[in-house]
Amino acid sequence: MLKRVDIVGNPNIGVFILATDEYAIVPYNLLDEKADIIKETLDVDVVKSSISGCSLIGSLAVANSNGMVVSPHVLDREIKQFEDLGINVATVPGQYTALGNIIAANDKGALASPFLSEKAINIIEETLDVNVESTSMVGSDIIGSMIQVTNKGFLISSNAVKSEISFAQEVFGVEGDIGTVGKGISLVGACSIANSKGAIVAKDSTGPEMARVEEALGFLDDDF
């Protein structure tokens, strides 16, 4: 299922919300009607929480079906809440706390900014149980903001070149394509949320953008 909805009052849906195939973590102040849209579209349980006492959940954490890596400033009560949900949680040391902005991951692989230390990469690999490749993409280190990836496909900034698309396909083990959302926004990871069952993109996304998202994330063969 694919929808364009104003979830958080601006295009940066992925900055505030973290989604996997099992759950979506949203800010405490998200309206229940918006949470219901996420639950219906992604077919997941929706949990209200914070990370480091902040509503920027999608920026401060990365998760797949195997676990979640979070900012080292995460609060003990937040870790307990996630662990009570059965999530394997680990903190990633270092000064780069906005992990969601610099890591893109699914259940088969991950791309991470070269800013991250070897120790940080090792923790990510162990927690998410995937191989992590450190690289820049599209001339930028904010890989998580540039890519929206699921276990069925990925959408990458329209500025990506063929070699970068091929490399991402190799790492994530799924096919993908370039695109934009929200009338030309190339930060597709920051301006969407998605899992294998659905996606929500910035409200201003055009028909052609929606079609590209649908194809890149592998929804064309789904029965809605």
Image (tube, grey):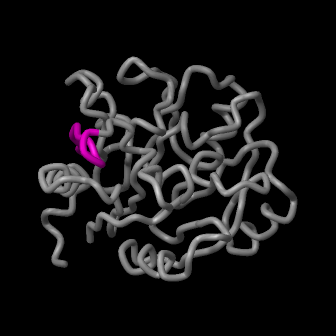
The answer to whether 55 is drawn above or below residue 87 in the figure is above
What secondary structure is the stretch in magenta mostly built from? loop
Query: At which x and y percent is residue 44?
Result: 47, 76
User: In the picture, which quadrant includes the N terminus?
Assistant: bottom left
Name which residue lies at 41% across and 51% down: 11
Name which residue lies at 46% across and 38% down: 145
The answer to whether 70 is drawn above or below residue 144 in the figure is below
Closer to us: 83 or 76: 76
Judged from this view, the residue extending furthest toward the top is 139
Query: At which x and y percent is residue 186?
Result: 32, 36
Name which residue lies at 32% across and 67% down: 198
Name which residue lies at 44% across and 73% down: 38
The answer to whether 191 is drawn above or below residue 85 in the figure is above
User: In the picture, which quadrant includes the C terminus?
Assistant: bottom left
Q: Quadrant of residue 68?
A: bottom right
Tell me how many marks there are. Answer: 0
Closer to us: 70 or 66: 70
Judged from this view, the residue extending furthest toward the right is 76
The answer to whether 158 is drawn above or below residue 197 in the figure is above
In this rendering, position of residue 215 left or right of residue 72: left
Determine if the magenta segment contains residue 146: no
Judged from this view, the residue extending furthest toward the front is 9
Query: At which x and y percent is residue 119?
Result: 72, 28
In this rendering, position of residue 152 left or right of residue 52: left
In this rendering, position of residue 8 left or right of residue 192: right
Query: At which x and y percent is residue 217?
Result: 26, 54
Closer to us: 146 or 132: 146
Q: Quadrant of residue 6?
A: bottom left
Determine if the magenta segment contains residue 182: yes
* Magenta-colored span: 174-184
In this rendering, position of residue 116 left or right of residue 42: right
